[in-house]
Amino acid sequence: MTEAELPVQVMPLAQFIAGHPWRVGLMHDRNQDVLIWITRGQGKIVVNGVRRGLGAHNALLLPKGTLFALDLGPQSLAQVLVASPGTSASLPRTPRHVRVRDVMAQAELTG
């Protein structure tokens, strides 16, 4: 099974962007569900035409087909989980932006 066929992949933001920040900076959608966990930095995201600010300890759930553009600062750090659609039936099918304030929850997501 190749990496592209894996049902779930976890990678740092730099690997997700693959050296081409325009790939996520332009409005686009994906064929997979995407979870982005930001641990440092700040930026903006546009999801289905709505712009929001981002900062550390923010989680973004972008289900398959969600139109989005991500613009994070150069010092930002994040982890990205890419999953085949339907891998987890318990995930919501609408985009979510969550600011996690509880330290224990932050540590659990980062781990």
Image (cartoon, grey):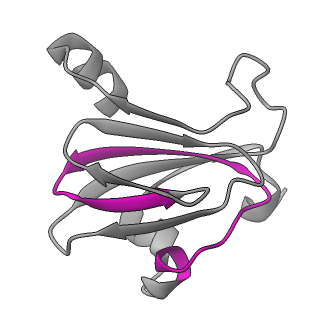
Q: Quadrant of the C terminus?
A: top left
- Residue 62, x across and y down, in percent: 61, 46
Q: Residue at x 21, y 71 (%)?
A: 73
Q: Residue at x 39, y 49 (%)?
A: 79
Label count reads 0
Drawn side of residue 66 relative to residue 59, left or right: right
Q: Is residue 86 above or below residue 81?
A: above
Q: Nearer the viewer, residue 88 or 62?
A: 62
Q: Is residue 110 above or below residue 108?
A: below
Most extreme residue toward the front is 50
Magenta stretch: residue 93 in it? Answer: no
Magenta stretch: residue 30 in it? Answer: yes
Q: Image quarter for residue 48?
A: bottom right
Q: Quadrant of the N terminus?
A: bottom right
Q: Residue at x 56, y 60 (%)?
A: 49
Q: Is residue 50 visible?
A: yes
- Residue 77, x across and y down, in percent: 24, 57
Q: Which residues are magenta?
A: 23-46
- Residue 72, x across and y down, in percent: 29, 67
Q: Residue at x 39, y 37 (%)?
A: 59
Drawn side of residue 7 relative to residue 101, left or right: right
Q: Is residue 54 above or below residue 15?
A: above
Q: Nearer the viewer, residue 89 or 1?
A: 89
- Residue 21, x across and y down, in percent: 42, 82
Q: Is residue 111 visible?
A: no
